[in-house]
Image (cartoon, coloured by chain):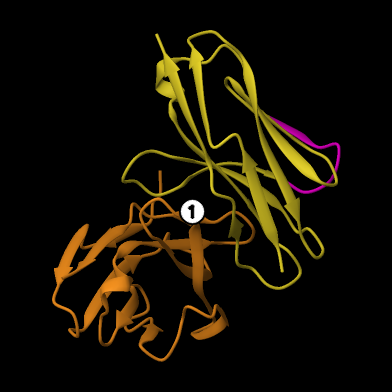
Chain colours: A yellow, B orange
Amino acid sequence: EDQVTQSPEALRLQEGESSSLNCSYTVSGLRGLFWYRQDPGKGPEFLFTLYSAGEEKEKERLKATLTKKESFLHITAPKPEDSATYLCAVRGNAGNMLTFGGGTRLMVKP
Amino acid sequence: EPEVTQTPSHQVTQMGQEVILRCVPISNHLYFYWYRQILGQKVEFLVSFYNNEISEKSEIFDDQFSVERPDGSNFTLKIRSTKLEDSAMYFCATSWDTEAFFGQGTRLTVV
């Protein structure tokens, strides 16, 4: 059974204070690790897909990296508008469905 | 930018009633999914649909649930006899290949 664990559950940062969110996973045959952003009461918004260890993807202040056991979402000089819950999900050999972690709720204060 | 559209945004229903949640996928997407998120919990997979049939389903997707694509555009989730524990956000997602794009969800409240 695929499993995803995210840490920390919540993270408070000052504007401009860089940090990283962690996603640990166990999966039978990784066919993609996905990062999503979710605002309160909204659906997950796609950010990145990573497929193999060593891969990195960047978008504005966000950079996602992948190893064989975990992924990190690095946030550089965050702004208040980056406040959201960040979700990690994996797709394995079992099928096309995604298995989600519990998310990290990020709060960036001005 | 293309998006997945879900209706209604909110639905309140009496326990035991049937509800139908609707989704308009992104044009040209081939794979369709339903997920749910109970308040404060993880997003959970319910069912996937490809080529007009169910391709995968979770243990949650029991006989009270059904999906169909009645007119080639809409994708629906029906819950036949709602229970209190069905209260959740229901998300439709669609994909062409790998990345799944989610709708804004339907908040279902069973009273």
Residue that carries the numbered disc 1 in the rendered image: B101
Indicate whether A55 appears above or below A30.
Answer: above
Quadrant, the N terminus of chain B: top left
Indicate whether B58 appears above or below B26.
Answer: below
Residue A46 at x, y = what percent? 52, 44
Indicate whether A12 appears above or below B7.
Answer: above
- Horizontal side of residue B33 vs A7, given as left or right: left
Q: Visible in this render: residue A75?
A: no
- The residue depicted at 33 percent of the width and 84 percent of the height is B70
* Chain letter of disc 1 in the image: B
Task: Residue A6: name its quadrant.
Answer: top right
- Horizontal side of residue A80 vs B95, given as left or right: left
Q: Nearer the viewer, residue B68 or B37?
A: B37
Q: Nearer the viewer, residue B24 or B66?
A: B66
Q: Please tell me whether residue B56 belongs to the stretch shown in magenta.
A: no
Q: Nearer the viewer, residue B76 or A94?
A: A94
Identify the main secondary structure in magenta: loop
Q: Which residues are magenta?
A: A50-57
- Horizontal side of residue B37 vs A87, given as left or right: left
